């Protein structure tokens, strides 16, 4: 579940292993690039943390962030089911 944290949308994702986490990040990267909106994220082994904010709007949460969070959730669900 996404939460508003420090003027950004934040979510922590946990995976079975590093390969699953990296696969998720790669899939999200392709989607984010198509949308022209790129996340701030970290990865440590099987955990990916993501913060979404719109820099062009003064580092606040906008509809652009909400749309990307929905795309990220769909990627996560698709990989989780596989």
Image (cartoon, rainbow, N blue to C red):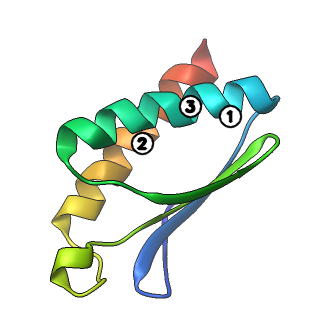
The quarter of the picture where residue 35 lies is: top left
Give the image location of residue 57, x and y in percent.
17, 81
Q: Which mark is residue 72?
A: 2
Q: Secondary structure at mark 3?
A: helix
Q: Earlier in the sequence, mark 3 or mark 2?
A: 3
Circles 3 and 2 in contact, beta carbons < 8 Å: no
Query: What is the crowding at mark 2: few (fewer than 14 residues within 10 Å), some, or many (at least 20)?
Result: many
- Label 3, label 1: how far apart the Cα atoms are: 5 Å
- Label 3, label 2: how far apart the Cα atoms are: 9 Å
Name the residue that disc number 3 marks: 24
Q: Secondary structure at mark 2?
A: helix
Residue at point 60%, 11% (across, down): 82
Give the image location of residue 36, x and y in percent.
20, 48
Along the viewing direction, whichever of 2 and 31 lies nearer the viewer: 31
Q: Secondary structure at mark 1?
A: helix
Residue at point 26%, 76% (across, down): 55
Name the residue that disc number 1 marks: 21
The quarter of the picture where residue 27 lies is: top left
Query: What is the crowding at mark 3: few (fewer than 14 residues within 10 Å), some, or many (at least 20)?
Result: many
Circles 1 and 2 in contact, beta carbons < 8 Å: no
The quarter of the picture where residue 21 lies is: top right
Along the viewing direction, whichever of 15 and 28 lies nearer the viewer: 28
Residue at point 42%, 77% (across, down): 8
Q: Between tags 1 and 2, which lies in front? A: 1
Residue at point 59%, 17% (across, down): 81
Left or right of 35? Residue 15 is right
Left or right of 49? Residue 36 is left
């Amino acid at each position: 579940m996404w939460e508003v944290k420090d003027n950004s949308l934040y979510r922590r994702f946990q995976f079975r292993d590093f390969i699953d986490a990296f696969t998720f990040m790669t899939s999200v990267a392709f989607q984010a690039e198509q949308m022209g909106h790129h996340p701030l994220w970290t990865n440590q082994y099987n955990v990916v943390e993501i913060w979404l904010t719109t820099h062009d709007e003064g580092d606040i949460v906008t509809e652009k962030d909400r749309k990307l969070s929905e795309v990220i959730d769909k990627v996560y669900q698709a990989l989780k089911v596989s």
